């Protein structure tokens, strides 16, 4: 009689670990509702200690957040139905208590990366998103340290921050005025992508800077209204590209770069709960 083969314990453990690694992480509780039309496209986003919240976010905006790209960049997210840009949703997503406790001991970039992976699963589960990646050579702007060196500052300690305020962030004070607080280069790149001077091109970080930094950046926007406002107040700041080099010691150059493009194969309207 042939006895069944018994796998060594080490192999069984390895197989269990491999299977666990293949399971995509998921939020513990998720609510999805259609947004008030008056709030559509506002895409107000809150990081929370136990998850995240969106008000008025489109599916394109969620995809951009989930994969760390800008929804404003031309051709970096392709395909999908028209409602992917016109319909907006309110999303409230929470992780379990164990994950919340673990997040409290992690850095913000580490937690943000987990939030992105969780959002990818949310899109797959609730919106039935199917997609694939393609690498294409595209016109881009490359961010590097200027010849004179970086002028970014070591972060100053902040006390008594309002609950929910991220430690690493960029605050805006109208057109052509931003302040970074322990800001990462990824924060800066996402902020720059929205400016008219960038003209919808992807911004590629080649600074080699991995920390968080404080900075103040002021410039005269290419937006006609901003130029008129600057003239009225007799305050003439330089252009964005010049301000980056003079004030932050960073330089943007136009180059062709291989860019990851997310192609949406299909997506469905979610059921509300």
Image: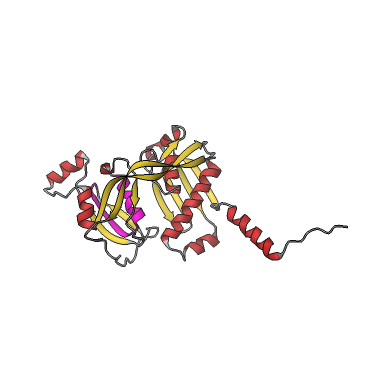
Whether residue 264 is visible, yes or no, is: yes
Residue extending furthest toward the top: 82
The answer to whether 224 is drawn above or below residue 142 in the figure is above
Q: Quadrant of residue 86?
A: top left
Picture quarter with the N terminus:
bottom right
Q: In the depicted view, which residue is nearer to us: 209 or 62?
A: 209
Residue 121 placed where, x, y %?
Answer: 53, 48
Residue 237 placed where, x, y %?
Answer: 16, 50
The residue at the point 13 percent across, 44 percent down is 231
The answer to whether 163 is drawn above or below residue 135 in the figure is below
Picture quarter with the C terminus:
top right
Count of marks, rendered view: 0
The residue at the point 41 percent across, 52 percent down is 46
- Along the horizontal axis of the image, is 100 left or right of 163? right
Q: Which stretch is magenta?
A: 174-194
Q: In the depicted view, which residue is nearer to us: 63 or 32?
A: 63
Q: In the depicted view, which residue is nearer to us: 220 or 135?
A: 135
Q: Is residue 63 part of the magenta span, yes or no?
A: no
- Along the horizontal axis of the image, is 236 left or right of 169? left
Whether residue 273 is visible, yes or no, is: no
Q: Quadrant of residue 58?
A: top left
Colouring used for the render: secondary structure
Residue 170 placed where, x, y %?
Answer: 31, 55
- Along the horizontal axis of the image, is 96 left or right of 207? right
- Along the horizontal axis of the image, is 12 left or right of 99? right
Residue extending furthest toward the right: 1
Residue 252 placed where, x, y %?
Answer: 27, 50
């Amino acid at each position: 009689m042939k006895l069944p083969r018994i796998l060594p314990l080490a192999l069984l453990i390895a197989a269990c670990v491999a299977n666990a690694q293949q399971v995509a992480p998921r939020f513990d509780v998720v609510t999805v509702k259609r947004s008030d039309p008056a709030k559509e496209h506002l895409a107000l986003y809150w990081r929370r200690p136990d998850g995240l919240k969106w008000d008025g976010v489109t599916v394109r905006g969620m995809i951009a957040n989930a994969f760390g790209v800008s929804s404003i960049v031309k051709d970096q997210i392709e395909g999908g139905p028209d409602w992917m840009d016109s319909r907006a949703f309110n999303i409230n997503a929470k992780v379990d208590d164990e994950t919340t406790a673990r997040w409290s001991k992690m850095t913000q970039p580490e937690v943000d990366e987990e939030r992105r992976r969780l959002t990818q699963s949310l899109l797959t589960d609730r919106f039935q998103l199917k997609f694939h990646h393609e690498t294409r050579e595209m016109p881009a702007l490359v961010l590097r340290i200027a010849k004179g060196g970086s002028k970014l500052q070591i972060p100053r300690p902040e006390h008594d921050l309002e609950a929910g305020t991220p430690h690493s962030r960029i605050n805006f004070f109208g057109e052509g005025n931003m302040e970074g607080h322990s800001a990462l280069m990824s924060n800066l790149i996402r902020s720059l992508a929205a400016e008219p001077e960038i003209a919808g091109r992807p911004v590629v970080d080649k600074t080699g800077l991995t920390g968080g930094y404080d900075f103040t950046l002021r410039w005269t926007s290419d937006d006609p209204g901003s130029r008129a406002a600057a003239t009225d107040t007799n305050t003439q700041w330089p252009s964005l590209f010049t301000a980056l080099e003079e004030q932050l010691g960073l330089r943007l150059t136009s180059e062709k770069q291989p860019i990851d493009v997310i192609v949406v194969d299909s997506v469905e309207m979610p059921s509300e709960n």
